[in-house]
Amino acid sequence: MRFWEKWFELRTPRFGVLTTWFFCVIAMILASLPIDHQVGERLGAGSVFGFLPVELLQSTWLYHSARVVLFLSALLWACYRAVPWSSWLTAIAFTLVWSLRMENTSHAAHIFNASNMLIFIHAMWFHFYRRPIRDSIRERRFWTSQTYPEWVFQLSLFYLCWFHTWAGLTKIQESGFDWGNGLSLQIWVYLWGAKQSPTTQLLLSSRTLTRLLQTGALIFETTAILGIFSKWFRWIVGFNLLGFYLGVLTTFIGYGFHINAILVALFLLPTRELIMRWEKSRENQTSRSEGQQIPIPQQPAQNF
Amino acid sequence: MEKLLVFGFVAVNLVSPWLIGELYPFTISPMFCDEPTQCCDFEAFAADGTPIPLESIGLQRNYDGNPVGLGVGLVPPYTLDQFGELPTDEEVRDHVEKQLLAHPEWESIRVVIKTIGEIDSQHVGVIEDKTRVVTVALEDINVDTTDSSLEILEQDESAQSSREESLLGHFSEVTKS
């Protein structure tokens, strides 16, 4: 069997519903952020919506309308209403809201790129599987239905791994393999680290340690793409990236990488495997209590 | 159609760093990709010792870990500060003179330039013996009219824009190479 054929196998939707709800919450949080349009000379397109006329890009009316649409569509999607319109609207409004923010600022932030792409993947899922999902809900067998295609997980995993690999490649391209020399990280921590944070103190106390951590981050970021080929490597990369994010979040308190950290925990750590194991044990318990023969559990999808 | 979109997503994201680069939601993940070995920290004071907001005299730090001006729609506000580089006293003096002419409400501006970098093999911090002070008084500036100073300021801002364009060009080359 070719590896991509496994991408079109179907699973139970529990993990997908968990991640979809997470994205709906993120979308509603983004919709709730106050407007922060700066004034200044136009530099050029900062987003895929950069082709719009400047008047529209700077329009507060458009921004607020997009926020309202984003909030309502995410709410509808989370409740499985008006699908697939609500899921696509969420994806488009999410892109538009943050694009307008990037078009009206001179300071970039990379806190929503990964969420944005994964929302598109999940919108695709609800688009192509809306009928089986709707039927399974109507027949009250949604949680046991096979309505979650493996490609939703694999595409999300691919994007997250690729995102982190590029973070490593850009560092190597810009600064070379010596990027992890410890000095630059100590300077950043000195300037922006929370003074009272134990990790700030630790990083500033030893360049040997900082060099080790910075080099480790470069290695695990750059090799993250290998996580799509091996479950074990995915977990190793996931644990290390999560450690990296925890270090970043406890040092640079004001930096908003919380969502990326949660995405790494959801898709690169064995979160889905744990949910599937819990589902199986629940299924077995139900079978025993009904005195039925225990069915042979379906094997989880192997990584290609 | 389903397969087309699934493989299309993979294909687009595989080539986007080279073909699209930094254009939200596409990204080359450029956060903290540079390798500074030192930087400077400015403090500015009026003649009576009142701190002057750095943004008002173009000495603020635009850099926040992301390459300045990459993936955004607006030109970053003008500043002398180029993260990772240390301006000379003359560069600071020239810059402050122009700012002082544009802000005649201040009689003089005193700028303290602290250098942050390696203080020993294990630590970073302010390198005390590299701390400099540049003071410029309005009465010491030798110019004819305020208009000419504004012209100088405009030239300076255009130089800043060229530097930013050059940076963006560099990143564009990075993504294409």
Image: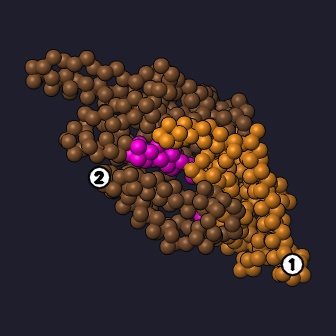
Chain colours: A brown, B orange
* Dot 2 amino acid type: Cys
Residue designated by label 2 = A79
Residue plotted at (79% across, 53% down): B166
The answer to whether B135 is drawn above or below residue A197 in the figure is below
Report whether A126 appears left or right of A211: left
Residue A113, percent from left and from top: 53, 48
Query: In the depicted view, which residue is nearer to us: B43 or A225?
Result: A225
The answer to whether A155 is drawn above or below residue A285 in the figure is below
Secondary structure character of the magenta stretch overall: helix
Give the position of the C terminus of chain B as an image quadrant. top right
Q: Cα distance, mark 1 to mark 2?
A: 64 Å
| Magenta region | A104-128
Please state the chain letter of the residue tagged with numbered disc 2 in the rendered image.
A
Residue designated by label 1 = B148
Do callouts 1 and 2 mark residues in contact (Cβ within 8 Å)? no
* Dot 1 amino acid type: Ser
